Image: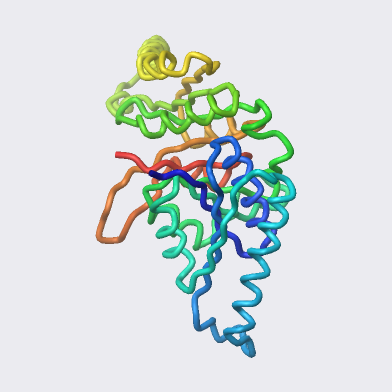
Amino acid sequence: MKNHVTVGVDGSPESRAAARWAAREAVLRQVPLRLVHAVDWPLDPVFPGLGRQDVDRWADQALTEAAQELRGHHPNLEITTRCLTARPAAALAAEAADAGLLVLGSRGLGGLVGFIVGSVAMSTVVATDTPVVLVRVADDPDGPGTGSGAEVVVGVDIHEACDRVLSFAFEEADRSDCPLRAVHGWKMPAAYSYVPFFDPDNERYIGRSVTHMVDDMLLPWKHKFPDVNVSHNVFMGSAGEHLVRASQGAGLVVVGRHVRRSPLGAHLGSVAHTVLHHAAAPVAVIAHG
């Protein structure tokens, strides 16, 4: 049973923010927290003079300090640590296999909203089927978040089954006592680009039809989670851009990632990519399909 939360720790401000977010999530879920540090040995030649003992000592210190800080805030939370010698992305993906959630830190874009998603985080997200949450330093767990009533925003796709995405979002909103807002973006059918004139009634008709489909998609989840206050927004245009706008003031944004393998490897998808790089809140990426 996947009954714990795993978080990557490397001593950076981003990973410390992720660890604090993960600890609060573990408390909400009433499950243990696992702190994981991974280092690829031997180190890149750009780090001369560092021996294996130096690296191990630094890794142990990063884990110990993180665990001590979190135990100070959550004395009843069960916390374990693991230090691994492996490529970080591969190690984190492997550690996520038996976890209910993996949390990673990501750099923010300075004064701008959004993330700078590093190669380790991006590689890990597409390498695991476990839900992954990316957290920035700006995502202060003691500020607005899923534990403080800020809404959970979820992107929905009426054209493909996204039960795993909706399940994660509704469960998160339910356990955190937060409202949930579903967002869907739609585009005019390609055939309309060949029509010599545009009838606004067509846009209104399609918009109403899409809204009804979103209603139908959410209905069974509303019945399953009657205590969750649910709203939805249906827009014409880019789903990713509308989710980014909706992320302002949100506690968490939930997006799906299609599990598709290709000769070039797994990929993230355009909507998830846009949200990961520009959202103003922590982002949960849920593999599905």
Task: Give the total of numbered labels.
Answer: 0
Name the residue located 57 percent from the left edge and 57 percent from the top edge: 80
Percent x, y of residue 250: 62, 31
How was this image coloured?
rainbow
The one of 78 and 103 positioned closer to us in this rendering: 78
Percent x, y of residue 254: 49, 36
Percent x, y of residue 241: 52, 35
Name the residue located 50 percent from the left edge and 62 percent from the top edge: 120
The one of 175 and 81 positioned closer to us in this rendering: 81
The quarter of the rendered structure image containing the C terminus is top left
Is residue 124 visible in the rendered image? The answer is yes
Is residue 199 visible in the rendered image? The answer is no
Percent x, y of residue 121: 51, 57
The one of 231 and 143 positioned closer to us in this rendering: 143
In the displayed structure, 253 sits above or below 95; it is above
- Residue extending farthest to the left is 263
Name the image quarter holding residue 201.
top left
The quarter of the rendered structure image containing the N terminus is top left
- In the image: residue 12, left or right of residue 95: right
Name the residue located 60 percent from the left edge and 23 percent from the top edge: 177
